Amino acid sequence: MTPSDVKATLSFSDGSPSMDLPIYKGTVGPDVIDIRKLYGQTGKFTYDPGFLSTASCNSTITYIDGDKGELLYRGYPIEQLAVHCDFLETCHLLLYGDLPDLAQKTDFTARVTNHTMVNEQMQFFLRGFRRDAHPMAVMTGLVGALSAFYHDSTDINNPQHREIAAIRLIAKMPTLVAMAYKYSAGQPYMYPKNKLSYAANFMHMMFATPCEDYVPNDVLVRALDRIFILHADHEQNASTSTVRLCGSSGTNPFAAIAAGVACLWGPAHGGANEACLNMLGDIQQIGGVEKIGEFIKQVKDKNSSVKLMGFGHRVYKNYDPRAKLMRETCHEVLGALGLENDPLFKLAMALEKIALEDEYFVARKLYPNVDFYSGIVQSALGIPVSLFTAIFALARTVGWIAQLNEMIGDPEYKIGRPRQLYVGAAPRQVKPIAER
Ligand code: SDX
């Protein structure tokens, strides 16, 4: 971080002593005002529920420009990574700071591939769940349970432990997600096939059965690989902040990632792709494109809790660059499957057009986000709606780990412990029960 030659001066109208606050500049993006000494010097906290104006850390991993609709992983635009790289190259970039050369890619791929199986005991955790358990309930349990197996890689302060835990989590998430799916379908688990690529192996574990050969479709594999790339990291979003806060206590990486899985489940966050597809299904039910106006009216009605799922973003006040890429992938997948006239896709395109012209959404800078099209693509790939967020978690695991490792690797890091503005009861005395 580079100290700016400009300082912020905080002064008080009651004559309390003012104080100078240093300002730091990043490589790009907003400067930050360093308030670390504020409480010590003024006895006051800052107040920022939802952290709309708060930087929780400094990071070298991902940069988002919400106004321009830009997303960079380690400085590379997402549009270039999605076209020129695959997911494992992106994992290498996020974890180690640069794209791998051929030898590094071969080595990294081999390390991940050698950890795709999970301990055979893991299948007994699944038996405890109902077959219709939500996959994110299962994943929250399974990912946390990994910490029961890998005692040789749970010391978060040991760089070697962090490295092997990262490889294990990236390698095993597809296996666990596929197991959660097979369990819900009542089908046997399919072991990983290490001669397949990362995305092809996931499709194999999801859709193959012991009864017949299964050859993943290259177009669909590429589409899935791109979905993984687009969801891999996203700065200090709710689930990443959860992983950082959880990991700051020194807990093991598997437990910290399990906390991220739990947070991502929420419909305002990673659960939006499932909610978006359900929303499109609901509009379809009441009459499809002709009924979009009626639905939009509900969304605008402050008394209704109806939101346009897949629209809006805390940071993007422009089109989410991932949504643009996801829409392209949508076209490719539906074309490859002969589903160009897919009614849900046509409905989504009509809804997007109407919303982008409607003053309510324009005034609030509500644009499609990554979740708007990802559900349609995944649905076309044959992935059940309830599994969408588990796949988001699969892809985001590398980002969570990279962010966690960056925090733990920072000698300045401390356990995260925010304060509050207390507005509860003033101090009072307990009375004997007879007098209450
Ligand atoms: C992800 O943070 C990340 O980076 C997340 C993510 C990642 O990769 O990690 O990008 C992934 O979570 C994408 C977002 C997916 N969520 C959804 O699509 C759910 C629908 N979207 C909203 O719930 C909402 O837009 C949020 C939660 C995403 C952002 O909400 P904010 O920034 O807190 O904005 P807000 O709720 O204060 O909204 C501002 C106004 C409000 O209206 P007014 O009070 O000003 O009249 O916009 C309205 C909101 O009611 N609004 C919406 C809306 N989103 C905001 N109105 C209708 N439909 C919506 N989707």
Image (spheres, helix red, strand yellow):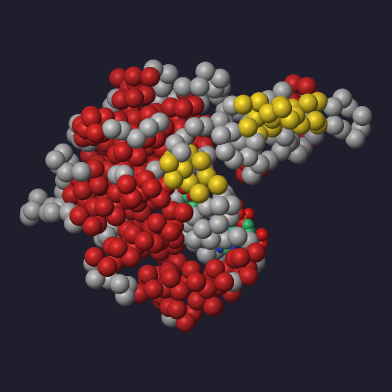
Find residue 312 and report its horizontal and vertical position in percent: 55, 58
Which corner quadrant of the figure contains ligand 1?
bottom right
Indicate left or right for 122 with 32 as reference.
Answer: left
Q: Residue at x 17, y 54 (%)?
A: 216
Find residue 227 and report its horizontal and vertical position in percent: 34, 51
Indicate left or right for 144 with 423 as reference.
Answer: left
Quadrant hosting residue 318: bottom right
Number of disc labels: 0
Indicate left or right for 227 with 319 as reference.
Answer: left
Quadrant hosting residue 433: top right
Which quarter of the rendered picture does the C terminus lie within? top right
In the figure, 45 relative to 135: above or below?
above
Q: Which residue is drawn at 50% across and 71% down?
A: 353
- Residue 131 in view here: no
Quadrant hosting residue 124: top left
Which quarter of the rendered picture does the N terminus lie within? top right
In front here: 315 or 385? 315
Find residue 391 and report its horizontal and vertical position in percent: 34, 49
Find residue 323 and report its horizontal and vertical position in percent: 44, 57
In front here: 436 or 76? 76
In the figure, 297 relative to 146: above or below?
below
Q: Which residue is drawn at 43% across and 78% down?
A: 288
In the figure, 46 relative to 292: above or below?
above
- Residue 158 in view here: yes
**Which residue lies most toward the right here?**
15
Q: Which residue is drawn at 33% across and 65% down?
A: 331
